Amino acid sequence: MSGVHTVLNPATATPVAEVPATGLDETDAAIERSHEAFAAWRGVAPGERATLLRRFADVVDAHVEELAGLEVRNAGHTWANSRWEAGNVRDCLHYYAGAPERLSGRQIPVAGGTDLTFHEPLGVVGIIVPWNFPMPIAGWGLAPALAAGNTVVLKPAELTPMTAIRIGELALEAGLPEHVLTVLPGKGSVVGERFVTHPLVRKVCFTGSTEVGKRVMAGCAEQVKRVTLELGGKSANIVFADADLPAAAAAAPYAVFDNAGQDCCARSRILVERSAYDEFLGLMEPAVAALRVLDPADEASEMGPLISAGQRDRVLGFLDDAEVAFSGSAPGGDGFWVAPTVVTSADPAERIWREEVFGPVVAVMPFDDEADAVARANDTEYGLSGSVYTRDLGRALRVARAVEAGNLSVNSHASVRYWTPFGGYKQSGLGRELGPDAPQAFTEEKNVFIAH
Ligand code: NAP
């Protein structure tokens, strides 16, 4: 190991644990062991692989409270979110445990023989996870990758390695063979970059910033390595005047301040039809004031701190030149706190309207009509998610189809279900995760012709 990293509790800025940082040689050795384990793992009969994944899910289920507690301390997530996140890993494993026995190919009619297709696993898959949702994002990659017969090396973010390390131990407890899932805490510039350059890693699943994602994609191009990118967002919440305004205003804070706004799907731009603009802001203000921003160790907390001092300072920097309409509360102390803040934006060129804040700040802007709303929503390099609030079903569908983003919700801000596809348009990503087709993204389709 090349040194240790001190993991902090972001609510109090106090140390939680010392975690070893994997060095380059150890990363290479782990990738080679993972490659050696691949031959046997791909050969495990489909029903047996399914059973092992179900057992893994059951062991995670038995440790939901423990995993959630780790995330409360390490990532500053609320108890409710942390329990959901641990449960999401369990559910992903259960769902994709159904895949090995269903990963069938096709028989295609041809002249002079029989033609068959097979979904062959790729080999070692490298999964690079950010700090904002350490457990779900690990699960979205590892569950379908393992189900399709690949082995996995997984790098958690340096700031939030605790739950991934524990999930790696639980895999062994559940009976997964050694080196089928290997968790390698360490630096992105060491471990993560080696996943990109090592020829035995056959696919990289990267979730993180658009800036690093572009570098990962360029690096993968050297070996024509398969790559999935889940990157940043600047999603719009479009509220029409005919919507149930009290419901839309009550939901809006949760659509952006959940996880203290450190959510790639955060609806961090709110577009409100001009005739309803003042009423909407008037309804939203008490909803923001009522948000319980507390130390996440308190079960009543609805929003915790930001992940680090650096992230807090970055987010506060956005407020220097922004027009604050109103804000909620935040505790004092040494933790990395920012109060949920609503700003108004008059000019789409403003930094607060264009850049991903990744913190509890939302910008609100009026629009004139449907075409204007769609044009403003699409005036961004990102395209991950978005919401449309209206009572007009035709308009809801027209606008949802017109917004250039991968995940739209109507009269809702829910974006993620493990059984529906998830991913971004434009610079929010490449490829899709989750949903029924995810295991196929971890395979090569092979065609075999047999002459009669
Ligand atoms: P980041 O700085 O890009 O880091 C993400 C991961 O990449 C971390 O594990 C990091 O390691 C690693 N990394 C850093 N440099 C690397 C390199 N040169 N090669 C390979 N790996 C490298 O992003 P972040 O700040 O942790 O996460 C926030 C971003 O993630 C936001 O932009 C957010 O929108 C995005 N996100 C997107 C989705 C989605 O599904 N679209 C979901 C969640 C988050 P270290 O820990 O050592 O830095």
Image (cartoon, rainbow, N blue to C red):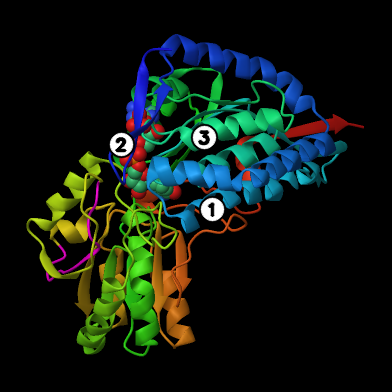
- Residue type beneath disc 2: Thr
Give the quadrant of residue 60: top right
Q: Position of residue 104 (x, y in %)?
A: 78, 43
Seen at 69% across and 43% down, the residue is 57
The magenta stretch spans residue 342? yes
Give me the disc on residue 83.
Answer: 1
- Residue type beneath disc 1: Arg
Q: Nearer the viewer, residue 442 or 159?
A: 159
Seen at 65% across and 51% down, the residue is 91
- Residue type beneath disc 3: Ala
Secondary element under disc 2, as helix, strand or loop, is strand
Q: Nearer the viewer, residue 339 or 141?
A: 339
Residue behind mark 3: 164
Give the class, few, some or many, for how many residues have Cα within 10 Å of label 2's Cα (few <14, many ≥20).
Answer: some
Pick whichever of labels 2 and 1 is earlier in the sequence.
Answer: 2
Give the class, few, some or many, for how many residues have Cα within 10 Å of label 3's Cα (few <14, many ≥20).
Answer: many
Pick whichever of labels 3 and 2 is earlier in the sequence.
Answer: 2
Give the quadrant of residue 274: bottom left
- The magenta-colored residue range is 336-348
For the C terminus, give its image quadrant. top right
In the figure, is residue 417 to the left or right of 252? right
Can I make out residue 222 in this image?
no
Q: Residue furthest right?
A: 452
